[in-house]
Every structure is written in structure tokens, then in C-alpha cells.
Image (cartoon, rainbow, N blue to C red):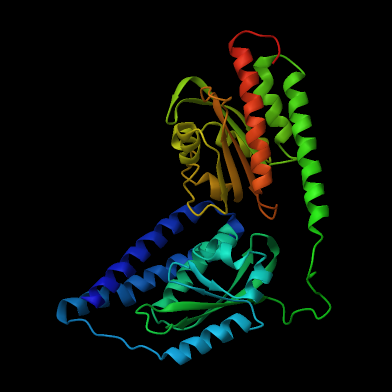
Amino acid sequence: MGQTDEFGEELADFVRRVAELKAARSVPSGDLPTVLDAAIFELDHVADRLWPGYERLLASGASGGTSGGRQELQLLKGVFQRLPLPVALVDRETVVRRMNFAAASFTEVRAGYATGRPLTGFLAHADRVAFRTQAAAVARGEGDRSLTVHLQQRPSAPVRATLTALRPGNEPRTAVLVVLQPAAARIPAGVERPVHRPPDLAETTCHAALMDLVDAVTTALLDGDADGALERAARVLHGRFADWVVADAADGPVTGGGGLSRTVTLGPSEEEATVVAVQDPAGCPYVVEAARGGSPVLRVRPADPDAFGRDASGAPVLVRADVTSLMCVPLAAADGPVRGVLTLFRSGARPAFSLAEAQAVDMLSRHVALAMACARHGNASP
């Protein structure tokens, strides 16, 4: 039954990739040829592999596999870690199993953080479907592949990804070895990454910036009547701290996503903001999660494109806005009811939200909730 199980997994993988292709319709028009190539490739895969495999299963049984020796496995691990090229070992779903030191330095992602997460999460949205499709093909034994992708942290620098199949030790499944290199002919000899950064200076600078932000938001909350406090705070956060700011206020008791209405939507342009402004907050899973649980939601490179719902055209908002990190923070004072949810997006190459920034926004959310409570009780200022 091993061959039957493998065929079932392969079919499930195909269904998931088709769902990703549907979600990728909202990428910029310049990136659509890559998505179309991936779609054609998947159709060929159904005709050439899945259907003949199904017919073979009806006519015959399963066959076993082979295993390697322990010494070869240890040698492979040692070579893998010390290889000077950026290398990652992923499964057919591109989930990282191992990443060597050179790959961690090249992608600027710690190996411990990357392990267990899809490698596609570190790529630009337009490249994810094509990379996942090619990785699945390599894992099926259809030969080595190579394609050009872009890291989210450096979208202007093309990266050449080479994929080859590998059967580690006595494991029953084929893994995919990914080698990442700059798409240029060679790596510039004069460019070196600094070995050490003074942590104290960076922490001090970050702390000072966050204190400035807290001061600016608090000033905005106090500078005017309480009714417009949420919008004033959102405008301070927009641009200097986040590319998108979305505020959903509670009309009454919040039950899940019910009872929320979208009151503020600030994006890169008024046209883009209008598309998100008409969303129903109840259709945004992250907003519902924050409102229901009363705890902040912080996500870096969110893997689920539907986690913030879809726009009127059916495109996932996270893909359309090229979101690389987000925060959904419930607006609630200590032991008080949830009065709304504040959502912040960062897009493109902008650094992801840090834990220190999330903590600062969580504190600001309580200040905003107090201001909204004053408005509800008819006070002139918080």
C-alpha cells in the first residue's frame, strides 16, 4: 500500500498547488507569465504522471525502496553544514528541514527560525507558486530544475535557485536540495558581510524610535476630542511605522468577528485602500482571532494567503498588498471589553515587525482603547 499512499499524497499536493495558482491571479501583470507557466506545467503533470499512475495502481501492487549506510549519512551531514554555498534541504512542500550556515547568511534568516517553515515564505509572492511546483516535480523524480526567484528582503536582486532530488539515509521520501546563488555570473569579490554588529547601538536606536512613536501617538490621542482618537492614532502609525493601517471598531459586544465595522483604512494609495475598506471584518480570520481571543496576532511572512480574507474581485488581500509581516491587535483596556481591532501591514522589502515593536503597539492599543472608552462615556478628552 506504500505506492498507493504516495499517490494519494501526490494528488493532495497537486490540489494545494492548484489553490495557490488560483490565489496568484492577483499578482502584478508583469509576473503573470511565470504563473501561467506554472499552470501549464501542472496540467502536463496531470496528463503525464497522475493519470498513468492511477492506471498502474489499478493494475499492479506496490514496490519497496532502498536505504543508505550510516557512514554516508554522517558524511552528507558534515559536507552539508560546511559547504561554502548557500544550501537548504526541503521536502516536497518546500518546508525547510535543514539550512546550512551559508544559506542562513545569504537569506538573512536564522537556520533555527527557518526550520519547519516553507522556504517559499521567504520569497516574493510572484515566485512562490513556480518554486513550489518545481520543487514538487523534483521530489517526484522528474529531474533537476533551476529557476530565478527573488527574496522578500531583497526583491531587486534576482537569485538563481537550483533544485535536485536527494534521498537522505533510510528515509522513505525523496527530499529536495536547494542551492541559492546570485543570478549574476559570479559573486562580487569585494563585498563582505560584517561579522559583528554592535548590539547596544542597534537596541538603543530601536528603543528611541519606539519611544518617539509612543509619544507621537499619545500626543495625537490627547490633541482633540475622543471621538476621532482612533483615526488620529492610525494616521500617526501610517507611513512612519506601517505601510497599511486598518482599524475595525466595535458597534457593540464583539462575538468572534461579529459586531465590528471597518472605520479606517490607510494604504499606499487611496485606490488600494478603498478595495480593503469595503471588506467585512468577519471575513478576515486574523481579525476574528484577535477579537475573539483578546490577544495580539503577529505573523512574519504569513503562509496562508487567505488569512486576511479576499477583496471584491476574489483576490487574497495579503497577496494583493504584498504583505511580508502583519500585526492584528485587539483594542481593549485592562479587564475591559474589546472595542475594536487595529491591523498593521508591512510590505515588500521593509523589515518585518520585531517583538519589541509588537510590544510597543500592544501598549499603544490600550491607550487607544481608553480614549475610545472616554468617547463612549461622553467625555471631551481621554
Q: State which quarter of the image contains the C terminus.
A: top right
For the question of whether residue 112 can be seen, the reply is: yes
Q: Which quadrant of the figure has residue 166?
A: bottom left
Q: Residue 169 appears at what percent x and percent y?
A: 41, 85
Side (left or right) of 174 relative to 377: left
Quarter of the image with the N terminus in it = bottom left
Does residue 379 sit above or below 125 in this rendering? above
Residue 244 drawn above or below residue 370: below
> Residue 100: where, in percent of width, then height?
60, 76
Residue at 69% from the left image edge and 55% from the top image edge: 349
- 237 relative to 257 in the view: left or right: right
Given the current orientation, which residue lies at the most extreme left position?
59
Instruction: State whether residue 266 appears in this view.
Output: no
Q: Is residue 123 above or below residue 345?
A: below
Residue 380 x, y percent position in the rendering: 70, 9
Q: Considering depth in this image, is 367 or 181 the residue closer to the camera?
A: 367
Numbered disc total? 0
The residue shown at (56%, 36%) is 276
Q: Position of residue 226 (x, y in %)?
A: 67, 15
Q: Nearer the viewer, residue 312 or 330?
A: 330
Query: Foreground residue, 178 or 377?
Result: 377
Quarter where residue 69 is shown? bottom left
Q: Residue at x 62, y 43 (%)?
A: 345
User: Front-most of 294 and 287?
Assistant: 294
Residue at x-position 62% and y-position 19%:
372
